[in-house]
Image: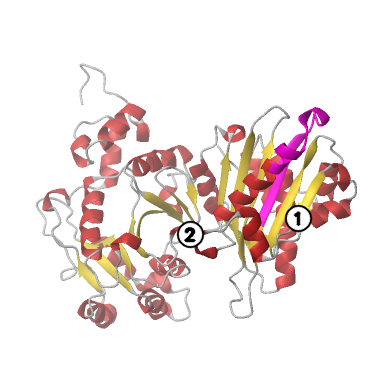
């Protein structure tokens, strides 16, 4: 569990830097490129830096940076691969140049960052990568903490100041609090406002974090309000949105996936087949996302159940899916988020019952422009919504876009979107699975009732049983189902 520590008392950057400098067993290097020339300054100013800092460098010139760390694809300098190459190269120099016999008690580390601040043309475009490679003991292999952050302060000098404080927080927590990942996360925002710096990806890897599930770290970023959306891939590793979604066609399906049912699979398969036939959709440059909102992760008590979250994540990852966890209740906020990274055509797959809610004006009363403002954000982008039909039971009529109820005030807007094919019905759906709902399947699993197996995709039922997911308990032989 990664619960926030209510007793956490932050130290100042100067106090943290001084504590590291005065510890004779911490010794390492700093490498900062781009706008990140701020972290090591705190350690120099704190005093006693000579016994902590083996080397501090800045490959500010791009040609020098490439000569040291090698060129990156697309000649990028602020990216995850650049940061990892910096950590690998600089820590390798420590091993090559320092004789362990001369430093028998010291724990080596390398701190690195690569950052770009905002510009006058793009006032909120600042972002960066930051990481630490460190030992927990002199005879131990290294572990890494890597994070990505976005800068929201329009003042460039204040952005640089925040970068320095965040760097000190990361290094201090890695070297002194690594045994408690929740405490590491608590410390990242010491003396830094969350409105100024947004941490949208964090990863902890290596032997020091062998019991850490990085997917839970992603969940914590959203749960704690560090960011509004996070991604992780089929391998369970956290992803950064600007690298995963950049200039791609994005197709998203939202749900609780508790558990994944045959309806979910039918929705994504048929929606996908329609999306790839669209103009301006490149099948080779496309990202499919299964989105779960934070509200969908909350239990009956209102808290986020981490075990329940991991159960869902395990199944989605086993199906080869990339998962998005967001705090975007309204779809227009989700589309606005995607628009940070791509101008290519996007698609949303949703059930007709969800579409009814999209056209409910009560969800937009907080907006000055009401529903028109929300729909302007939605459909100003190159977006198409694929609507999956609904049927409450096998005996009821199937509801589609032509039969769903729409308030008379919303009818002109609704008809306009239908006419322009921004709303389209999903074709070739399987009518035999329309009556399946995740909530019903979950209740059957927890109650030990038979028959739910036919409602989930092949393999998923075995995975639920073998791993006892969602509260599954094997039915004892001879017991009534």
Examine the rendered structure and indicate whether residue 466 appears above or below residue 233.
above
| Residue 97 lies in the magenta stretch | yes
Q: Position of residue 385 (x, y in %)?
A: 28, 68
321 above or below 155? above
**Mark 2 or 1, nearer chain start:** 1
Spatial distance from mark 2 to mark 1, Cα to Cα? 26 Å
Which residue position holds label 1? 57
Residue at 47% across, 76% down: 367
Looking at the image, residue 315 sits to the left or right of residue 72; the answer is left
Q: How is the image coloured?
A: secondary structure
> Which mark lies nearer to you, 2 or 1?
1
- Where is residue 408? Give x, y as percent: 25, 79
Would residue 225 be seen by someone viewing this image from the given angle? Answer: no
Vertical position of residue 120 compared to residue 96: above or below:
below
Can residue 183 be seen here? The reply is yes
Q: What element does badge 1 sit on? A: strand
Residue at left offset 21%, top offset 66%: 277
- Image coordinates of residue 307 in percent, x first then y, are 45, 37
Q: Nearer the viewer, residue 131 or 436?
A: 131
- Which image quadrant: the N terminus? top right
Question: Splitting the image into 4 quarters, where does residue 260 fall?
Answer: top left
Q: Which residue is mark 2?
A: 243
* Relative to 266, 125 lies left or right: right
- Is 211 or 410 nearer to us in this picture? 211
The residue that appears at 74% across and 61% down in the rendered structure is 37
Instruction: Decide if residue 22 is on the left or right side of residue 130.
Output: right
Neighbor class of circle 2 (other Cα within 10 Å; few <14, some 14-19, many 20+) is few
| Numbered-mark total | 2
Nearer to the camera, 198 or 83: 83
Q: What range of the chain is rendered magenta?
A: 93-113
């Amino acid at each position: 569990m990664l619960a926030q520590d209510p007793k956490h008392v932050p130290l100042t950057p100067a106090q943290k830097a001084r504590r590291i400098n005065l510890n004779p067993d911490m010794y390492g290097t700093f490498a900062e490129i781009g706008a990140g020339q701020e972290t090591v300054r705190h350690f120099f100013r704190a005093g006693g830096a000579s016994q902590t800092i083996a080397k501090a460098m800045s490959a500010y010139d791009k040609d020098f940076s490439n000569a040291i760390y090698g060129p990156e694809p697309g000649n990028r300098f602020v990216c995850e691969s650049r940061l990892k190459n910096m950590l690998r190269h600089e820590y390798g120099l420590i091993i090559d140049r320092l004789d362990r016999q001369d430093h028998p008690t010291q724990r080596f580390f390398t701190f690195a960052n690569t950052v770009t601040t905002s510009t006058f043309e793009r006032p909120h475009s600042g972002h960066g990568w930051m990481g630490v490679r460190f030992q927990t003991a002199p005879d131990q292999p290294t572990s890494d903490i890597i994070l990505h952050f976005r800068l929201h302060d329009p003042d460039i000098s204040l952005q640089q100041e925040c970068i320095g404080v965040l760097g000190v927080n990361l290094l201090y927590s890695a070297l002194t609090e690594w045994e408690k990942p929740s405490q590491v996360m608590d410390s990242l925002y010491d003396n830094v406002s969350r409105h100024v710096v947004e941490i949208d990806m964090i990863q902890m890897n290596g032997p020091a974090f062998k019991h850490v599930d990085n997917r839970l770290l992603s969940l914590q970023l959203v749960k704690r309000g560090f960011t509004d959306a996070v991604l992780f891939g089929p391998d369970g590793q956290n992803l950064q949105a600007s690298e995963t979604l950049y200039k791609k066609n994005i197709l998203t399906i939202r749900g609780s996936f508790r558990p994944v049912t045959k309806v979910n699979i039918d929705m994504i398969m048929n929606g996908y087949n329609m999306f790839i036939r669209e103009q301006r959709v490149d099948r080779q440059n496309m990202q499919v996302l299964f989105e779960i909102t934070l509200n969908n992760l909350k239990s009956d008590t209102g808290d986020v159940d981490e075990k329940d979250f991991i159960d869902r994540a395990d199944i989605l990852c086993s199906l080869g899916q990339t998962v998005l966890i967001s705090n975007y209740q309204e779809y227009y906020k989700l589309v606005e988020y995607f628009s940070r990274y791509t101008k290519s055509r996007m698609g949303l797959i949703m059930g007709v019952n969800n579409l009814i809610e999209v056209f409910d004006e009560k969800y937009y009363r907080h907006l000055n422009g009401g529903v028109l403002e929300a729909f302007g954000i939605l459909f100003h982008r190159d977006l198409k919504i694929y609507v999956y039909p609904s049927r409450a039971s096998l005996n009821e009529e199937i509801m589609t876009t032509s039969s769903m109820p729409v308030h008379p005030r919303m009818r002109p807007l609704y008809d306009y979107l239908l006419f322009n094919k921004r709303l389209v019905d999903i074709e070739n759906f399987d009518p035999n699975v329309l009556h399946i709902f995740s909530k019903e399947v979950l209740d059957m699993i927890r109650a030990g009732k038979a028959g739910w197996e036919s409602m989930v995709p092949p393999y998923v039922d075995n995975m639920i049983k073998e791993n006892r997911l969602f509260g599954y308990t094997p039915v004892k032989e001879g017991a009534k189902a």
